[in-house]
Image: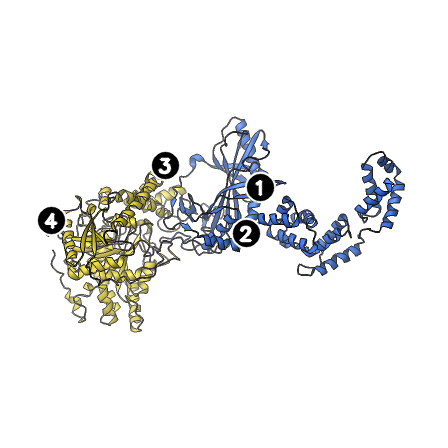
Chain colours: A blue, B yellow
Amino acid sequence: MASTPSATLLVGGYEVVIGFETHTQLSTQSKIFSRAATAFGAEPNTQACAVDLALPGTLPVMNRGAVERAIRFGLAVGAHIAASSVFARKNYFYPDLPKGYQISQYEIPVVQGGAVEFFLGEEKKTVRLVRAHLEEDAGKSLHEDFVGQSGIDLNRAGTPLLEIVTEPDMRSSAEAVAYARELHKIVTWIGICDGNMQEGSFRCDANVSVRKPGAALGTRREIKNLNSFKFMQQAIDYEVRWQIEQLEDGHAIEQATVLFDPDSGTTRAMRTKEDAADYRYFPDPDLPPLCIAEDWIAQVRDSMTELPRNMAARFARDYGLGEYDASLLTQSLALAAYFEATARACGQAKLACNWITGELARRMNTHNLEADQLPLPPSVLAALVARIAEGVISHSAARQLFDTLWQDAQVDGKASMDAARARVDALIEASGLRQMNDSAALQTLVDEVIAANAHNVAEFRSGKDKAFNALVGQIMKASKGKANPQQVNELLRKRLDA
Amino acid sequence: MPSPAMTDTSTTATHPTTLQGALHDATVYELAAALRAKQVSALELAQHFLARAEQHADLGAFVAVDPDITLAQARASDARIAQGQAGALEGVPLAHKDIFVTRDFVTTAGSRMLRNYRSPFDATVVQRLAESGMVTLGKLNCDEFAMGSSNENSAIPSVGQTQPGPVRNPWERSRVPGGSSGGSAVAVAARLAPAATGTDTGGSIRQPAAFCGVTGIKPTYGRASRYGMVAFASSLDQAGPMARDARDCALLLSALCGPDPDRDSTSLDLPKEDFSRALNAPLSGLRIGLPKEFFGDGLASNVRAAIDLALQQFQALGATLVPISLPRTELAIPVYYIIAPAEASSNLSRFDGVKFGHRAPHYGDLADMYKKTRTQGFGEEVKRRILIGTYVLSHGYYDAYYLQAQKIRRLIAQDFQQAFTQCDVIAGPVAPTVAWKLGDKSDDPVANYLADIFTLPASLAGLPGMSLPVGFSPAAADLGLPIGLQLIGNYFQEARLLGAAHQFQLATDHHRAKPAGF
């Protein structure tokens, strides 16, 4: 259970406790209660209809697509989908809240419970979800473009959101970020959210508190609107330090909502509990309870793509991979598809996995690419991996070839496996990196190195195993990296043992 | 009992048609037939009723008229009649309570907040009646945001006036017409319109209908789309027609009801109905339940006398009277005055001066803008209900008030279901008294609220209820003011209610009586 972590991480003697609320913008074409479009970036107030403007006499009508997406999410995290859930009004005055209330779900949300599992490093973590509820977004107040006045843009008003709330299960900023990344993966994987954090499609609020180990939960402060993973970690780290300093200085933490300023790297209180509004929640009489029949849930289940955790389990089972590797390969649908295509084409799943989670992942990071944007099609990587497995090239040679192939693959994703093999083989020949598998030639090399490094031989004979590796290194160097290391090992040992 | 109406010979003389008497004495049913038979044109009717509205502007019934628009609609109707494309109610004029938004007329909801507000769309009810061919005479006065039972709460000057004032009861101008659909009841009673739309949240169709001697029905909650009705209390608001008799109400109700799933989630998914289908059903065997709680000490003797006579008439028509009980009748008042203000306080939050409607001309910061705008824009009764509603929804009070009220509301609905195992319809008074004097209760909101006791239970249960004229107070005591009988049916039993009312009206004349001078 995540609530009792295996090893308690302490910061300055304090345990960090983090819970998340994430506003996920659902990828519907139209708004949650009106027919206006949800597209991002339109001219102000061009995507706000009478309902969004809260004109007198207008009423909300539920968008079926938003409910369908909530069901998908519930299924993806193993949650209970409520047969009947209730929309409530959250009442407060703000110029970008046209009705003077936000339609949300309060006492009975559509998605109840569930959990998100992920790896923090190689440690498996589980964060329990409290709920996920449907609600509408507010508009935007624009303070910059007007002198002495504020502009209101209601394009975003009524955009469907799924607010996903966790238990306070996270114990470090790193775990919080790993959770957020996993959640981001899930919502994009199942296609309910475009995941665009710059445009606000995935906004996280972090509830952060600290306590002495074993003590009751400390008072939390909520960091609002964390819209990048980088800021998320910085903000939580700063907040944790700040809270510990306060406590160490003898001050109590006051419950508050804070904003993170990326420029200064600090958090700043927006409002404290004393200013907290009384939202006067009550069931919205304009919307009957949201009833979801079992067969609708079954239909949604049948239409869903394989979930990341199921796919990871399958990878582990069918390809003999470790759980951690399988989770790395299922970071996105595209990456998983890339892996499967490669593994199937070369029949070397573990090796393909190592290349994808190593060399390929590094380049994806460097170039900020997704798995469906790679210049190197799976067939080419498969051909390369196959040649490594066959001992035609060494790993280090393959890394050099990979570089060339990344720059200029010459075959595309649609080309046949034969074409990919031909390309890789031609490159191997042209580069002269084909591994030396000729025993006679290798034997000569081994003998030469033994003769030239008598002291290493003497050391080895006196029991120093390290000297053996030094000799292997010398032989590899003499072969310009082309010698088959396994073969070298065998030949050398045979010679020295003789 | 007042003398039968004087005949307005100036208008009837030129119309030697099957229409008996003056044009404005004809019912919707008769006018529709005469229009189809081309005995009268939509244009003539529109002109006639516009002239009457102007002539009787002192009643304060209309808050908006626009002859150009009305006459254009009438001409279009005449064209459709000429082309054989007439709708069911083609060319018949009516006027809308100013709580329905309209493209062609301003919509004020009786509030300063919306003094010059014009909606970019028509309410579904307005649209449906227009689609059936009806011509809009204008918008009718009402209590601000439909809050009130005397129509003394309108903040909008009626047509021809510069200052807001109460709507006057045509039977006696010093009396209230009832509310909140006071303008609608007065327009029909004074023959300024053959029919009008009203809305009923806690009795706002039935009570003014009773006070003004007209027939009105509030259908089962969800029958009529609420799209385009300026919301007061969403779980209670229902639209319905007010007209001369039950037959007209059936015609109008058939036209204005129907599912509206794309615009109102609470609209019932039931096919359109012909509510006239049971008009001619005999009453023999009809079991009329009389809740003992409706006939207690609070009921004025003059009202009681007229109700008793009406019930005898129903017996004579073959119905049987069954004593029943609605034990939580008294609780309906506190329950309603928690739920309705709670919903209203939230529904009226959109009137904040930001997007439409009134904004205070001078203000400091945002909070000051809100404060001044709402202080200036809302009247006293509306503010009172916003305060009550805000209070009962507040943290720490919600469970004790709102939640408790919802529980009792369900019990009230259950009481009705229990009662309907013993009877087919329920009958009783609409209001404990006849129309009171203007100003009598203006300083006493609680007295106003208590007068709603007989209409609130059906509203809370979402049941259909109607009011039909059954007599008059003795002239000596109360100046000959109309008295209404309330009929409450089980869910979806509108046709049965209308049938019972129609059979009664075939046998009686109360619904034909009209105030002197009209």
Label 1 SS: helix
Q: Judging from the image, what secondary structure is the residue with disc 4 in? A: helix
Kindly report which numbered mark, 3 or 2, lies closer to the viewer in this rendering: 2
> Which one is in front, A203 or A317?
A317
Q: Which residue is mark 1?
A: A177
Q: CA distance from mark 2 to mark 4?
A: 76 Å
Q: Which residue is mark 4?
A: B477
Residue A190 numbered mark, or none: 2
Task: Please provide percent x and percent y for residue A304.
Answer: 53, 54
* Image coordinates for residue A29, horizontal then vertical, percent: 49, 56
Q: CA distance from mark 3 to mark 2?
A: 41 Å
Foreground residue among A247 and B437: A247
Q: Earlier in the sequence, mark 3 or mark 4?
A: 3
- Residue at x 54%, y 27% (from the top left corner): A248
Residue matched to label 3: B396
Q: Nearer the viewer, mark 2 or mark 4?
A: 2
Instruction: Using the image, name the chain to which the residue with label 3 belongs.
Output: B
